[in-house]
Amino acid sequence: MTPEEWVRQHYIYFLIEEKGYPRSLIALEKQLVINNRKKRTDILIFNTSGNPQIIVECKAPSIKITQATFDQIARYNLKLKANYLIVTNGLDHYYCKMDFEKESYIFLTEIPNYKE
């Protein structure tokens, strides 16, 4: 298992066991096309209507979270329009709520628990 995969597996466990997100709403390595290039999300959580709710970008613990990491997930979100973005390397976790009106994101201290 790669270090990034270790982070992803632990974060999925956290989402299901600690935050209450149903497994049935979680997709792994969901493919999308941006500028004619195939990309993939590490973790994508849908709402019960089938719309993207949360995008999670996982990095290996040795990778520092930078603006480039946020730029990557923001590019994905231009297409997906998820309400929340999460970036984690297993040690540091950053949570953002999208403000689509202002075309920005608001940093949060944690991700909300699952609510139907």
Image (spheres, helix red, strand yellow):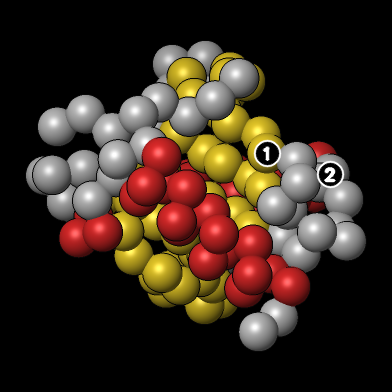
Crowding near pointer 2: few (<14 within 10 Å), some, many (20+)?
A: few
- Using the image as rendered, state which of residue 67 and residue 110 is in the foreground: 110
Q: Is residue 10 above or below residue 52?
A: below
Left or right side of 79 for 75: right
Residue at 66% across, 34% down: 94
Amino acid of disc 2 = Thr
Residue at 65% across, 84% down: 1
- Residue 34, how many percent across, how many down? 51, 65
How far is mark 1 from mark 2, CA to CA?
12 Å
**Secondary structure at numbered mark 2:** loop
Report the number of discs.
2
- The circle on residue 66 is 2
Left or right side of 81 for 9: right
- Using the image as rendered, state which of residue 56 and residue 11 is in the foreground: 11
Q: Give the foreground label among 1 and 2.
A: 1
- The circle on residue 93 is 1
**Secondary structure at numbered mark 1:** strand
Residue at 34% across, 65% down: 27
Which quadrant would residue 104 be assigned to in this image?
top right
- Using the image as rendered, state which of residue 12 and residue 81 is in the foreground: 12
Where the C terminus falls, by quadrant? Answer: top left
